[in-house]
Image (tube, rainbow, N blue to C red):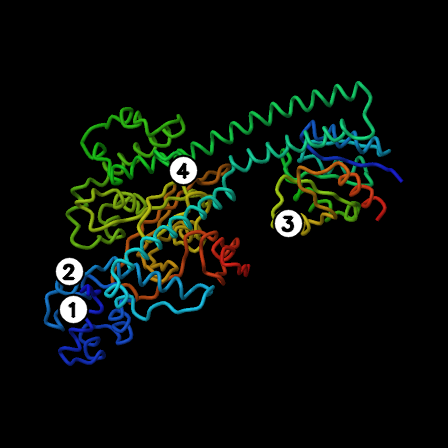
Amino acid sequence: MAGRVLLIEDEPNIIEAIRFILSRDGWHVDVHSIGETAVAAVHERAPDVLVLDVMLPGRSGYDILADLRADKVTEKLPVLMLTARGQKADRDMAMRAGADRFMTKPFANEDVLAAVRDLASA
Amino acid sequence: MARIALTGTRLRARRIDLGLRQADLARSAGISASYLNLIEHNRRRIGGKLLGALSVALSVDPASLTEGADSELLQNLNEITGAQQSRPSTRGGQPPESPEEFAGRFPGWAAQVTAQHRRIGALEATVANLTDRMTHDLHLSTALHDILSSVTAIRSTSTILTGDQRPDPVWQARFQRNIHEESARLAEASQALAGYLEEASDARSGTATPQEELEVWLAARDWHVVELEAPGAPDIDTLVADPVFRATGARRVARHWLSRSHEDAYALPLQEITSHLSEAWPDPGALAQQHNLPLALVLRRLAALPVDVAPGPAGLLIADGAGALTFRRPLDGFPLPRIGAGCPLWPLFEALQRPGQPIKAVVELPGPLARRFQTYAAVEVLRPGTFTQPPVVEAVMLILPLDGAGLSPARPVGSACRVCPRENCPARREPSVLEVAAGAISF
């Protein structure tokens, strides 16, 4: 079962790679790269799964996720967080903010794909 | 056998020779018997008036209690003993009951032990600095983030190109171009990071930020710039042309500091301060009131006295309105974080919370010797607030070592949470690397 994925990430070549592997698996992938307008983009695109980077221009992924969890419409949206910081404190912060999955860069393509599939079917 | 003894030991021996009870001697010196007991067992430093009072009571010359003792060696041994007792034991065996006995019987080994202890302390400080830098250094954090992003893009893209399901030729060309771009970016980021780390570890100065370059320059002058004391405008251009200042930013920071220091010197000339000096530091509050000057200015001036004029060593900290440390004059026994925030319990930050209220507080640093310091803190308004703009303020804290500490209550503080061993501190913002190193994370 493939659906819609919104990828919020600001690195063009990472975007291209993730979009390719998800599209090849049948997902419709939308992309957004600006932290400040990310929450509005989620409402507009209404994805089945959100893939969210932590370090974004304008606003952090943690803040974006906190806003989404405080909103009735998006409080249960499955979210996979991506970050270059893999310390326990970062993982804890992601979980406290409400992330369903947490993956550190550099990640394996098959892990991203498996996480998105799992989150969509959960 | 070597004949060495600390002041406290000599004092105790003299009291016993005279047949005096501890309580009687303590009363005549105006201190409690328990505090005298700490002094006699070399658990508290002694000097100044208290040493004088005890010498009178014991009918001895104060110098005979303090001179000729290899006090540094014994103090180091006491410190080692205390440090070992405060850590979990990893092997059997107890430290010697008496560091004096150990140093007296095996002076060579005692010197070796203290040398090794100093080496361990230096290595621990290096680890703390590096951890501090990894946590708080924005430049380093950003550089690592860039490298990891490039590695991620390359890994992900190359997996697509080499996987079972090869993309069509158009996508293959596109991904090859992406890998080329990212590999170039990776090389550039790696070189920049290597250059940054080399600069940071430059043995010549050990500096990395404009503030640190200024502090290195001032330290080389014993924190007193004599050119600023002379009448007339100083040649600041020549001063900031010193090769220590390697970047425009450092020269700008130095220029600002020197200009303000010159204004401070004009407002409170050296001769005005020296007229108030004796063996002790003057009361900064009284000095400010007498000359109708901001207390923060007086604190800066007292920390900039020449070494032959100052009653003793002094430390100075300055923080901006956000609490970021913008100036550090370090002081022996009062370690300062090189990067990142300091202890939230410092009077410096209390002053920021109450800008109109000067703070005078005795603080105690953690450690076997529990060193105490007299601090004075005040806030200066650099730009008053308006209806549209908040005020710009700066907090200043003067730090002076206290001899004969232990008589008055002291505020327990630390250096920075990352290197502070106070486990149950209510102000702790993050775990200590010292706890992590001991394998006992309690945060």
Distance (Cα) linking label 4 and label 1: 49 Å
| Residue carrying label 2 | B67
Residue that carries the numbered disc 4 in the rendered image: B383
Q: Residue at x 80, y 36 (%)?
A: A5
Amino acid carrying mark 3 in the image: Met
Within 10 angstroms of label 3, few (less than 14), some, or many (20 or more) residues? Answer: few
> Splitting the image into 4 quarters, where does residue B212 fall?
top left
Q: Which residue is mark 3?
A: A93
Q: Residues at marks 4 and 1, common chain?
A: yes
> Rounded to the nearest whole Å, what is the CA distance between mark 1 and mark 3?
58 Å
Query: What residue does disc 1 label?
Result: B53
**Secondary structure beneath label 4:** strand
Q: Closer to the camera: disc 2 or disc 4? A: 2
Image quadrant holding the C terminus of chain B, namely: bottom right
Q: In the image, which is nearer the foreground, mark 3 or mark 2?
A: 2
**Would you say the residues marked 4 and 3 are in contact, meaning their CB atoms lie under 8 Å apart?**
no
- Within 10 Å of disc 2 (Cα), the crowding (few <14, some 14-19, many 20+) is few
Residue B101 horizontal/vertical position (percent): 26, 68
Q: Which residue: 79% across, 39% down?
A: A113
Measuring from the top left, give residue B79's x and y in whole percent: 33, 61
| Label 1: chain letter | B
Mark 2 belongs to chain: B
The mark found on residue B302 in the picture is: none
Q: Which residue type carries mark 4?
A: Arg
The span from disc 3 to disc 2 (Cα, nearest Å) is 57 Å
Disc on the earlier residue, 2 or 1: 1
Q: Same subunit under labels 1 and 3?
A: no
Q: Residue at x 41, y 34 (%)?
A: B209
